[in-house]
Image (cartoon, grey):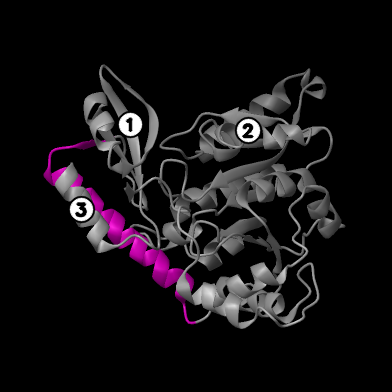
Amino acid sequence: MLSFESDYTTGAHPTVLRRLSETNLEPLSGYGTDPYCESARQKIREACACPEADVRFLVGGTQTNSTIIAALLRDTEGVIAAKTGHVSLHEAGAVEYTGHKVLEIPQENGKIQADVLADYLRSFYADEAHDHMVFPGMVYVSHPTEYGTLYTKAELTAVAEVCRTYGLPLFLDGARLGYGLMSRQADLTLSDIARLCDVFYIGGTKVGALCGEAVVFTKNNTPRHFMTITKQHGALLAKGRLLGVQFDALFTDGLYFEISRHAIDMAERLKEIFAAKGYEFYMDSPTNQQFVILTNEKYAELKESVAMTWWEPYGGDCSVVRFATSWSTTEEEVSLLETLI
């Protein structure tokens, strides 16, 4: 069966797997205190052009989102997110489970718009009863978004300026960050993100690692006792070496960026194939996720030989279906899909 279901359906990049094997029998201290974690931290700081950054390694995306949000918010606060944001839709209430409300605001192509955010915050503080409401305590964005779309540098700068005005930390979910950075339409760099955001993470699980995310606090703003908080949220790995070795390999000789660009190349080829055969797209995604409108009959037919993700109904007898490429997608797989659609 062909798989375009997601970007974490295969294991680890061979280079990452080889480094795990080569270091397997070294006795190393735990919880991220080993030399491979420190080497990875330094390489990430250099890639972000942020020498003062504090880099921490957590086990997965959902754990990372809920841990960071819980660590940064006070008991009286919630997190602002787009209505289609990952923490709003696809994390099983993990943020609410920590006792914090997700404050949804309207989105455009999966993105928060700075003027909409500013209007929301003005309206909140203009409400004379706001002391009885959940206070906005931070802003969450993802890059790429749930729909594979990207913030431009101007858009993220505008959102960051609103956050500064209201004293709110800006948190960027980078579960698929490599694919966003290497998109042909990207104008945001890692250094831009480090400059504009208070905290973000570099996704490993979906970009060549077996598991793990690298959290980057950029403004000397790591919450007190963050390791303890991470452990309380089940996101701290005793064998922290597993994460350090992987990120050290990913950030050696540009591997993270190289394999991310490959996924983009495969997605662009996928887009060309669907367009040439007359299919319509739900929206224009410049990243590794492509959202194609299929008749329900065609979807049922393809399901016999292709793994993909049903996304949402489109009206009539059609649905939006996601096809995702990854670092491991091959040209042969894309060519074979072409014969089936």
Mark nearer the viewer, 2 or 3: 3
Left or right of 99: which side holds 153? Answer: left
Q: With 228 as the anchor, is 302 left or right in this view?
A: left
Query: Is 316 inside the magenta-drawn segment?
Result: no
Does residue 279 belong to the magenta stretch?
yes
What amino acid type should be assigned to the residue bearing mark 2?
Ala
Q: For the point 59% across and 59% down, which residue is it?
A: 211
Indicate the amino acid at tag 3. Leu
**Residue 292 showing in the rendered view:** yes
Q: In this view, does 250 lie above or below 116?
A: below
Q: Which residue is drawn at 78% across and 64% down?
A: 238
Which SS class for mark 2? loop
The circle on residue 320 is: 1
Residue 163 percent coordinates (x, y): 65, 45
Which quadrant of the figure contains the C terminus? Answer: top left
- Helix, strand, or loop for circle 3? helix
Residue 177 circle label: none
**Can you tell which quarter of the image residue 46 is in?**
bottom right
Q: How far apart are marks 1 and 2 (CA)?
A: 22 Å
Query: From mark 2 to mark 3, how far is it between C-alphas?
Result: 35 Å
**Residue at (53, 78) in percent of width and height:** 18
**How far from the left and from the top, in percent, is residue 209?**
54, 64
- Magenta segment boundaries in residue numbering: 253-281
Q: Position of residue 285 (x, y in %)?
A: 34, 46
Task: Name the one closer to the observer, 75 or 7.
Answer: 7
Residue linked to disc 3: 336
Which mark identifies residue 92? Answer: 2
Position of residue 202 in the picture relative to residue 324 (left or right)? right
Q: Sequence order check: which comes first, mark 2 or mark 3?
A: 2
